[in-house]
Each structure stands twice: as C-alpha cells, then as structure tokens.
Amino acid sequence: MVDQTPVVKSDDASRLRNDKVLIQIPPLPDETWITRIEKQYAGLEIRWEQLDWKPGDSTEAGAVDLSSETWEGVTIACLFIPHTAHLMSNVRFVQLTSAGVDKWCKHETYKDPNVTICTASGVQSPQISEWVISTWLMMRNGYLDYSATQRQAQASKALPHVQDTPGMRMGILGYGAIGRQCGRVAAAMGVQVYAFTRNPRTTTAERRDRSYSLPGMGDPQGSIPSAWYHGTSQEAVDDFLHQDLDILVLCLPLTESNRHLIGRAQFDILAKKKTFLSNVARGQLVVTDALVEALNQGKIQGAALDVTDPEPLPDGHPLYTAPNVFITPHVSFRTQNYFQRILDVFEANLERLSKGQPLLNEVSV
C-alpha cells in the first residue's frame, strides 16, 4: 500500500506543475484522493470522469470516447479502456488498469516512443491466485459432484481416489506478478512450482520481481520455483509441457506470436499426465476446438477457464457441456479493493514521475 502521509512540497513536485491528469474508471470520483494529490503536487490538475461500462461492453479504442474538451491539455491518463489516438495527442504517460496490453498493441499512442505506458500488474494477483487454487481444488476433489447431489436432497457417497497436493507439480506459463502469487500459494500447499518466462532468468538478479506488488504477496526474489524454463518458440513451450505437470496455469499476456499457443499437439503432450488446465490470461491462447476435444476424450483431467475464445461464449457452445470444465465470465480479477489498488499504483508512479525515477510496470514496446 502506498504511504498516504502528506509530503512536503519540493522541487520534485514542480515536475508535474503543468500536467493535467484524466482518470476514467468505473467508480465515482474520489474527491478526497483528488484533493490530496493536487495538494501534494501544486499546479497539477485532475479530471475524473466516471466510466459507464459493464461486462460485455466493448473494450475497443473509441468505445467510450470523451469529448475533445475533456481531453484538452491532458498529459497524463489513467484509463480502463483505450480512447482514439487523436484525443490523446498531448499525453506523455498512460497508466492502464489491466495487467495486459493486448487492447493497446495497435494503438498509435502505444507505438509512440515519447509516451510511457505502465500496466497495473500486481493489482490483480491476490484475487486471481485465489481463483486458480480454489477452482483447481474444487474440481480435483469432486466438490461440484457433492454439491449437485446435495441439491437433489440426497446423501453423497465418498468419491474414490482423492489425492492431496503435496508433491504435485504446477507449471506456470508466464511468471509475472499473477504467476508469482499463484506459485506462492501453491508452494505453501507443498506443490512444486515450475516457471516459464520469455527471457532467461539464470541469475539471482534476473529472477527478482521489480513490478508493483502488495506487501507479503508474490515471489519478490524469485526463490519459489524449483525449475525455470524460458523461450519464445513453440518448441520451448512444448518442452515445458513435457515436465509431468499436474496443473498448467496460463498467466502470460496475449501477443500475435503466442495466439493459439495451446492446441491439439500440446494437449497430446499434456495427456501423458492428464494435466489440469487453468486459464486466467486470455482465451485466444488456447485453440477452443482442441480444448473441447481434449476434455471429451479425457486427455486432460479438466479445465478451469475464466477466459474463453470467443468471449463471451455464445449460448449452446459445446465447451459449456464438455466434461470436467468450469467456466466463469472473466471475473477472477474482481474485488472490492481493485480500483483502490489501481489508485495506489498510479499514485506511486506519479511520485516516481515527479522525481524522474523509473516507473513501476513500464511496458517495453
């Protein structure tokens, strides 16, 4: 949590003197927060526009454009959804409210080398890790079966062959803030953690996490995994999948290069151990038809999906009725604390911006 103690004005604060901030997120404006930040940075002006958005609404650029008058002079923005580039012509820093950047990758502002983009990585880690672990335990221990029998007002029979988690192996594809918190919780349950990253993490310094993190969360030193894998090729990913994983957790951002990363050939690899699949990243990482086939043929133990392709799934889609699958409508990130944490990381970055320091969660384009 960012220290909210008032700070004495200094020369650092003057770096934001001519900036205008636009915040557009779903909550109502927090006038106390606005007053405190404007007082801390004399001359800084904050405009907060509540976003009228609900799940299922478009998240494409321009879907919720504000007027050009609202954008006039804005140099810093904190946004839930992209706006069209011409409105953002004066912006030098954008704080996203998501951990991923796939909605921004084709945006002209994202491509502009003079604009700094930061994600909200770390804000979602506690609640998403809870979703991953709880859905895995719920399905592997048959809790849904017990619940179904209870709803029929009948006594359940004990399910055979229940196995606890110590000694199991979790493979985390994408060992960022969310993956590290999943690893932390899994390790506390006696699970071996294998991590996969895009770039090599061979030294202690390379394994450290320099992104935003809540106190006591994640894996700051990168000390939890018992094995590290890396690479950018399909062959590197497939080698990781060959490591006798009991559960594979997808936590990596969606890019053009990893779209449909997990298809029929990958499910054939996972079939050796009947690996459980948990996807809290993006639905397009997985070939949906291949997933349905893998579930129907018993290649994998099951799947917990907070994201799908397409999203939302149309009524009657065969994934709904495939065996051993649990689907939620992209809600694993939700918590009443979510947007307060967004403000915390945004505030931390405003302080760093005022001091000329490197920002948290800065995206390398």
Image (tube, helix red, strand yellow):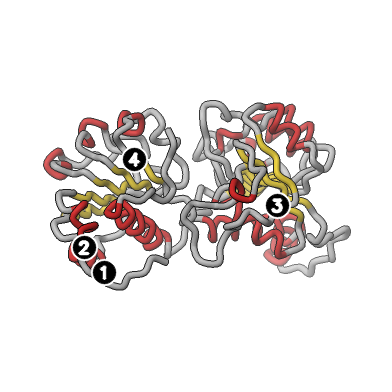
Amino acid at circle 2: Ser
Mark 4 vs mark 3, CA separation in Å:
31 Å
The answer to which of 199 and 149 lies nearer the viewer is 199
Please report whichever mark, 2 or 3, sits nearer to the chain's N-terminal start: 2
The mark closer to the camera, 4 or 1, is: 1
Please report whichever mark, 4 or 3, sits nearer to the chain's N-terminal start: 4
Residue 223, x across and y down, in percent = 67, 56
Q: Residue at x 76, y 68 (%)?
A: 154
Amino acid at circle 3: Pro
Instruction: Give the farthest residue toward the left.
Output: 69
Above-or-below relation of 315 to 33:
above
Mark 3 falls on what kind of element? loop
For this view, does 26 lie left or right of residue 280? left
Residue where numbered disc 3 is placed: 225
**Do residues under tags 4 and 3 come within 8 Å of each other at their CB atoms?**
no
Mark 4 vs mark 2, CA separation in Å:
24 Å
Residue 151, x across and y down, in percent = 68, 64
The mark closer to the camera, 2 or 3, is: 2
Please report whichever mark, 4 or 2, sits nearer to the chain's N-terminal start: 2
Residue where numbered disc 1 is placed: 7
Amino acid at circle 4: Thr
